[in-house]
Image (tube, rainbow, N blue to C red):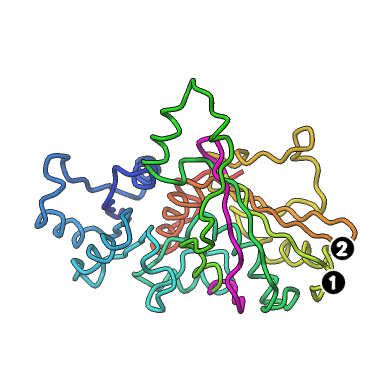
Amino acid sequence: MSFTAYIDGQYGTTGLQIHERLGAHPDIEVLSIDQERKKDPELRKEFLNKADVVFLCLPDDASRQAVALIDNPKTVIIDASTAFRINPDWVYGIPELAGNRDKIKKSNRIANPGCYPTGMILLVRPLVESGLLPTSYPLVVSAITGYSGGGTAMISDYESKVGDDLSDAAARLKNLDLNHKHLPEMQQLTGLDYAPVFVPTVGSFSQGMLVSVALHAHLLKGSAQDIHGMLTRAYASEAFVKVLPLNDESQLDEGFLKPTACNATNSIELFVYESEGRIYLVARLDNLGKGASGAAVQNMNCRLGLSETTGLTCI
């Protein structure tokens, strides 16, 4: 059985990558509006309502407006903005979370997760649910990402510097107001009492991401071994999640953990490092793959009853 899909915002970074993945998908026909007619409101509404699946790759307000145009109760909406991620009428799109896959299969409103929260939530939620990590823990989350995560404006900014001295842009802290837009989903989807302190770093590379969480064993209800075991059990049957051995050094390049090893895949790798009661958790993923377009296609596959790996690559 084949299905139709329409990408609203197909010329943005996420939309283009969804389009590329769907182009190789054996069960999906992509519906497109000609470039010169893409702003025709009636035609846009027609496509939003006739497709089996609609991907919204738009700013928050534009996503809300697009959803208001959809009156076909059978249309499945997968929204890539932050507009609906903590909305109780929408399902958060990480199938690997306990109980979430069945919810996605039954919902026509799926909020695609953010790239940073994907790594953080997959690391933290099993620990909170098991009681290993107290809900009151004062969590600090760090991350480094390729500049493609900042959208077309940031991509243009970095790529305009190619050939020039990139030292000023090699690694730049972002969101030092400490009010990153992903904080609400980070807190709600993990069950923490307080939003974490989160400041990401943008690096002078295009794709790839490391998301990390530092923990102190004396504040936990278990050890690093317990954490590693919990993560291993939680994702043992998941095609896209790989938990590396405790204190794994096989992925280190002269002592460095590269953020780009999962690029062009929908995989996410989880690491646990420990020394003398200090614990460091790391998630590695492609910010445009499992962190955006790959996750959207995986959610579509899940909702339509297709194999979740169809059209996607895993390590």
Q: Residue furthest top?
A: 163
Q: Can residue 231 be found in the magenta stretch?
A: no
Which quadrant holds the C terminus? top right
Disc 1 crowd rating (10 Å Cα; few below 14, some 14-19, many 20+) is: few
Residue 224 spot, x, y in % from top left? 82, 63
* Residue 25 seen in render: no
Q: Residue at x 54, y 60 (%)?
A: 117
Which residues are the magenta region? 188-208
- Left or right: where does residue 82 sit relative to residue 135? left
Residue marked by disc 2: 277
Question: From what the image shows, is residue 287 above or below residue 256?
Answer: below
Q: Can residue 198 be found in the magenta stretch?
A: yes
Counting residues from the N terminus, which is met first, the one under dot 2 or under dot 1? 1
For label 1, the SS is: helix
Residue 27 spot, x, y in % from top left? 35, 50
Which quadrant holds the N terminus? bottom left
For label 2, the SS is: loop
Contact flag, marks 2 and 1 (Cβ < 8 Å) = yes
Residue marked by disc 1: 218
Residue 176 spot, x, y in % from top left? 54, 56
Residue 47 spot, x, y in % from top left? 18, 56
Disc 2 crowd rating (10 Å Cα; few below 14, some 14-19, many 20+) is: few
Q: Amino acid at mark 2?
A: Gly
Q: Residue at x 56, y 43 (%)?
A: 172
Q: Amino acid at mark 1?
A: His
